[in-house]
Amino acid sequence: MATNRTFTMIKPDATGAGYTGKIIDRIIDAGFSIKAMKWTQLSIDDARAFYAVHAERPFFGDLTEYMSSGPIVAAILEKDNAVVDFRELIGATNPADAAPGTIRADFAESISANAVHGSDSDENAAIEGAFYFSARELA
Ligand code: UDP
Ligand code: MG
C-alpha cells in the first residue's frame, strides 16, 4: 500500500462521549482525506486479533475488553507523510503527556481510554486498514 496512508479508530470512550464529529473535524482540518470510514463494534475476539501484537503486554486483557465495549469508527486516511503526521496530531499514548492541542490531550480520558488509535508504521497501516476494509470500499 502507498506510504501516504494511515489507519485510525475513534475509540469507545470518544464515541460514547459524543466526540466523533469533533474528532473527524480535527482530522479533516489537519489535511487528511478520508478514503474509507465505518461505524462498527468489535467483538472481544476481533479486538484480540486486532491487538495481537500486544498479546503479551500486561494491559492486553483490559485493552481488548475496553475496545469491544462500545462502538468505534474505523477509517483509512490519506495525506503526505500520513503515519507520522497523524501520530503528531493525536499526541502521546497517555493524554497526561500529550501535547496541548492534540486530539488525545483534548478528548482522551486515560492512557487506556485514549480517544483514538493511529498506526505506527506504513506496514501496520496497511495491515490494520485491511482488517476492516476491502479494496472495493476505498473511495
Ligand atoms: N495501552 C494501555 N496501557 C498502557 C499502554 C497502552 O491501556 O500502558 C492501550 C492504549 O489504549 C493504547 C493501546 O494500548 O492506545 C496500544 O498501545 P500502544 O503502545 O501501541 O500505544 P499507541 O500506539 O496507541 O499510542
Ligand atoms: Mg500503537
Image (tube, helix red, strand yellow):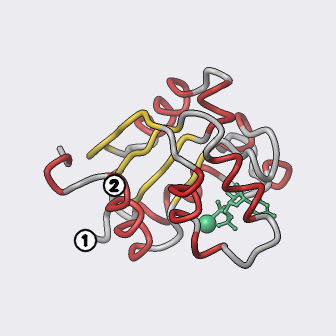
Residue 74 in the image: x percent, y percent? 43, 44
Residue 87 in the image: x percent, y percent? 57, 59
Q: Which mark is residue 29?
A: none
Examine the rendered structure and indicate whether residue 27 appears above or below residue 60: above
51 relative position to 134: left or right = right
Quadrant containing ligand 2: bottom right
User: For this rendering, which residue is in front, 23 or 11?
Assistant: 11
7 relative position to 10: left or right = left
Task: Kindly identify the residue that appears in the image at 47 percent across and 73 percent down.
Answer: 121
Which type of secondary structure does the marked residue at label 1 adopt? loop
Task: Kindly identify the residue that appears in the image at 65 percent across and 39 percent down.
Answer: 69
The quarter holding residue 80 reads bottom left
Q: Which mark is residue 1?
A: 1
Residue 107 in the image: x percent, y percent? 70, 34
Split into 4 quadrants, where in the image is the C terminus? top left
Give amino acid for label 1: Met
Examine the rendered structure and indicate whether residue 90 appears above or below residue 6: above
Task: Kindly identify the residue that appears in the image at 40 percent across and 36 percent down.
Answer: 28
Residues packed near mark 1 inside 10 Å, few (<14), some (14 to 19) or many (20 plus): few
Split into 4 quadrants, where in the image is the N terminus? bottom left
Outermost residue to the left: 136
Query: Circle 2 sits on which residue?
Result: 79
